[in-house]
Amino acid sequence: MPATIKKITVENEARDLKTFDLVFNNNKDVNKFKYICGQFAEISVLGAGEVPIGIASSPLDEEFVQFTVKKYTTGVVTTALHNLDQGDKIGIRGPFGNGFPMKDFEGSNLLIVGGGFAVTTLRSTIKYMLHKKNRSMFKNIILLYGARNPGELLYKNEMIEWGKRDDIDVHLTVDHGDKDWTGNVGLVPNILREIAPSSDNSICILCGPPIMVKYTIIVLINLGFTPERIITSLEMRMKCGIGKCGRCNIGPKYVCKDGPVFTYKELQGMPNEY
Ligand SMILES: Cc1cc2nc3c(=O)[nH]c(=O)nc-3n(C[C@H](O)[C@H](O)[C@H](O)COP(=O)(O)OP(=O)(O)OC[C@H]3O[C@@H](n4cnc5c(N)ncnc54)[C@H](O)[C@@H]3O)c2cc1C
Ligand code: FES
């Protein structure tokens, strides 16, 4: 589906993370692209190729679809995307993947833990849950989000606004602070241990670099979260995105189709290839 870039926001000091606000060129494609939080799409740049990118906007955002993309120095498509300007055209294929089981979250406390730029689909989820139409469906919401340094925190203004609300408890942390930073300094698993949220009637949604996910799960289990109540999203290399090419499989599961969202209990039953 052809789309036009309406706005580009540079998200970090290193300037290698940009959020693209996209509008479909054909109105009928808006309805074709009905998505849920945690899904992804294949974004294509003419002459460069296509890449799977998590959807960063909320399904309730009507004017545009957003994707936040990190540019890899050697990345063919992500570099081509970063070289585009407002008004340029790109392609969107999707939405793909299972997404977060939002219905299962209703009536529960939500602990949302993110690290690095994997926070994009968590941002979609938080925006969705905080929407006035939806907020009463979920109990307490705690967000713990960590980045390497303050300049690498994504969606900073939004996070600050959420921090002022009384219906979400926001904890930001960085590995290394600077002279202006007044928040937490420390790795996500350590800060989680300090916050020690209750696991009673709680579900944790966890997205981040594999090493962060690994050590955070240890803390979660110690806090009493059971493996079926820890939910994460995998970022395997992909090609087709629709379960045809076999590029993304882990054992019998296709991450693009059966995932990318899995419970930790499901991951425990899969070969450790992620
Ligand atoms: C379900 C899913 C959701 C994703 N969501 C996002 C998102 O929201 N934002 C975002 O910026 N990226 C996301 N990614 C990762 C993104 O797809 C890759 O960064 C992209 O495919 C790189 O393409 P490229 O052509 O620029 O790089 P290539 O030219 O293919 O590779 C360049 C370099 O990047 C490395 N690389 C490429 N892909 C990955 C990867 N998946 N993991 C680790 N290293 C990689 C390669 O090893 C190589 O060194 C997601 C991936 C998946 C599967
Ligand atoms: S990317 Fe082709 S099967 Fe998953």
Image (tube, rainbow, N blue to C red):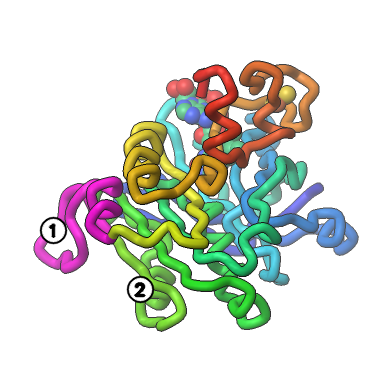
| Number of callouts | 2
The question of residue 110 being in magenta is answered with: no
Please tell me how crowded label 1 is: few (under 14), some (14-19), or many (20+) other residues with Cα within 10 Å: few
* Percent of width and height locating residue 25: 80, 58
* Percent of width and height locating residue 98: 71, 43
Residue that numbered label 1 is attached to: 178
107 or 66: which is nearer to us? 107
* Percent of width and height locating residue 250: 62, 20
Give the extent of the magenta segment: 173-195
* Percent of width and height locating residue 220: 38, 46
User: Ligand 2 is in which quadrant of the figure?
Assistant: top right
Q: In this view, does 68 lie above or below 129?
A: above
Residue that numbered label 2 is attached to: 160
Outermost left residue: 179
Residue 182 showing in the rendered view:
yes
Which disc number belongs to residue 169? none
Circles 2 and 1: CB atoms closer than 8 Å: no
Outermost right residue: 28
Residue 87 showing in the rendered view:
no
> Going from the N terminus, do you reach mark 2 or mark 1 first?
2
Residue located at (63% from left, 37% from top): 260
The residue type indicated by label 2 comes to Ile
Q: Is residue 178 above or below residue 136?
A: above
User: Disc 2 on helix, strand or loop?
Assistant: helix
User: Disc 1 on helix, strand or loop?
Assistant: loop
Q: Distance between the residues labelled 2 and 1?
A: 17 Å
The question of residue 189 being in magenta is answered with: yes
